[in-house]
Image (spheres, rainbow, N blue to C red):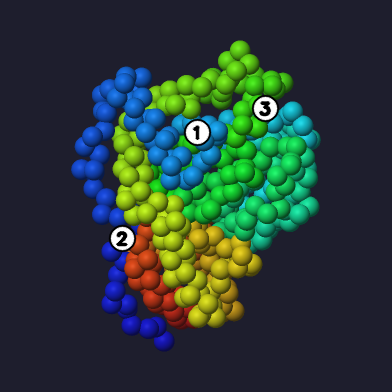
């Protein structure tokens, strides 16, 4: 029998894993100071871009000798830029446990045609970092956005490694504690934990990564938007706000507003606390129900941002159709938008729990998931 329709509803039903929910109480009026109609090369444009870089460093605790640049094409552009500019100097290990990591494998093996060691794990699991050779360059995602599986910590990455670690941290930055001394290249986009707009990526380079760029020239040609050096030296302007291509000053303003909000609530510790509270609201619900589970098998590797769930009830005949029906019911009720699993992932739900989401909204959503589950089981049984 279907439980009664829940009385409470999420105030903000936006739980998409990208673009993600805007900061609480967001209004376009907050963007009134955007440098619209001004050149990004004018003093005002450069100042705002540099402020975005400097405040990112402040909140994330990026070491002073690491460079931070704003680059084209979101996180994807940043990862591609790093791989095409740096790989090939030594052996490569590619680590993948979800679709985006698998995409980086395709780029390296089929496009760059490097003889890379590929280590893969199925959705819900993670590769064994103890087996990885960090004297090679290693490419991996910190948090698998489409699998809800994250790296538990950086303990397995040696401080005296010879290779570079290239880390796609797009759904981890601002929500998880990244060990900067273990990471040489870190990338992310504004559209994830900070709820910003797409198309802009962040590229963070350690001194070791800069040394690679200045001492190694890839065998393949580099498109203009990938070029980080000129005459064998790093183009320093990229890392003070002189972007390779024209950025959206509206999107820049939006990111600055989100960064200011993050500072106002207590910075990175509070952002991580909010994400963890959101995750906890989901996981406590899942732990109490026999028909749904976290896709990540190991609690230590469960994401606190892109939380992926699977239905386990034996009465479900077609998992993909069942999950789509749940998503459709919840969207029709206006209580949750865009929470279906990623197209390449196992059928189920994916609930974004990043810092811009309110825990009260996550808690209000959970009874609706149970209501939709029972309604769909009843409909399936009636149709049999």
Cα distance between the residues tagged 1 and 2 = 32 Å
Residue furthest out toward the top: 231
Residue 341 spot, x, y in % from top left: 51, 58
Residue on which the image places disc 3: 212
Q: Secondary structure at mark 2?
A: loop
Residue 196: image quadrant is top left
In percent of width and height, residue 95 lies at 69, 47
Which circle's residue, 1 or 2, is located before the other in the chain?
A: 2
Query: Which residue is at 42% across, 26% downward?
Result: 241
Q: Earlier in the sequence, mark 2 or mark 3?
A: 2
- Tell which of 375 and 210 is nearer to you: 210
Q: Of helix, strand and loop, which one carries label 3? A: helix
Of 335 and 378, the residue lying toward us: 335
- Residue hosting label 2: 12
In the displayed orientation, state which residue is furthest to the bottom.
Answer: 1
Give the mark, 3 or 1, whose residue is nearer the N terminus: 1
Nearest to the observer: residue 58 or residue 94:
58
Near mark 1 (Cα within 10 A), the count class, few <14, some 14-19 or many ≥20, is: many
Residue 199, relative to residue 260: is it above or below?
Answer: above
The residue at 47%/63% (across/down) is: 276
Query: Is residue 285 at least partly visible in the picture?
Result: yes
Q: Which residue is mark 1?
A: 68
Residue 20 can be seen, yes or no: no
Q: Is residue 47 left or right of residue 273?
A: left
Quick one: 59 or 250, which is closer to the camera?
59
Disc 2 vs disc 3: Cβ atoms closer than 8 Å? no
């Amino acid at each position: 029998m279907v439980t009664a329709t829940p009385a409470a509803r999420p105030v903000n039903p936006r739980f998409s894993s990208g673009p993600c929910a805007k900061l609480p109480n967001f209004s376009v009026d907050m963007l009134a100071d955007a440098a619209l109609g001004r050149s990004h090369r004018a003093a005002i444009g450069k100042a705002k871009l540099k402020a975005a870089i400097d405040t990112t460093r402040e909140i994330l605790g990026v070491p002073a000798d690491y460079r931070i640049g704003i680059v084209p094409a979101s996180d994807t552009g940043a990862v591609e830029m790093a791989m095409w500019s740096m790989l090939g100097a030594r052996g490569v290990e590619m680590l993948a446990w979800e679709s985006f990591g698998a995409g980086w494998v395709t780029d390296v093996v089929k496009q760059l045609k490097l003889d890379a060691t590929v280590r893969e794990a199925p959705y819900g699991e993670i590769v064994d970092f103890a087996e990885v050779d960090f004297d090679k360059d290693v490419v991996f995602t910190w948090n698998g956005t489409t699998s809800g599986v994250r790296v538990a910590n950086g303990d397995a990455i040696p401080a005296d490694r010879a290779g570079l670690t290239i880390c796609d941290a797009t759904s981890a930055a601002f929500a998880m504690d990244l060990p900067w001394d273990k990471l040489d290249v870190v990338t992310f986009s504004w559209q994830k934990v900070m709820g910003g707009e797409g198309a802009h990526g962040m590229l963070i380079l350690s001194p070791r990564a800069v040394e690679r760029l200045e001492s190694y020239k890839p065998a393949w040609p580099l498109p203009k938007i990938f070029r980080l050096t000129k005459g064998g030296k790093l183009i320093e302007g990229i890392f003070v706000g002189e972007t390779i291509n024209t950025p959206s000053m509206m999107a820049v303003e939006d990111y600055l507003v989100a960064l200011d909000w993050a500072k106002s609530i207590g910075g990175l510790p509070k952002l991580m606390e909010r994400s963890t509270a959101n995750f906890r609201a989901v996981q406590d619900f899942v732990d109490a129900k026999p028909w749904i589970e976290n896709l990540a098998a190991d609690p230590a590797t469960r994401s606190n941002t892109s939380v992926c769930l699977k239905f386990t009830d034996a009465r479900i005949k077609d998992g993909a159709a069942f999950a789509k029906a749940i998503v459709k019911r919840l969207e029709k009720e206006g209580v949750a938008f865009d929470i279906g699993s990623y197209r390449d992932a196992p059928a189920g739900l994916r609930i974004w729990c990043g810092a811009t989401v309110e825990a009260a909204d996550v808690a209000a959503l959970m009874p609706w998931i149970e209501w939709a589950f029972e309604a769909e089981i009843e409909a399936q049984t009636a149709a049999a």
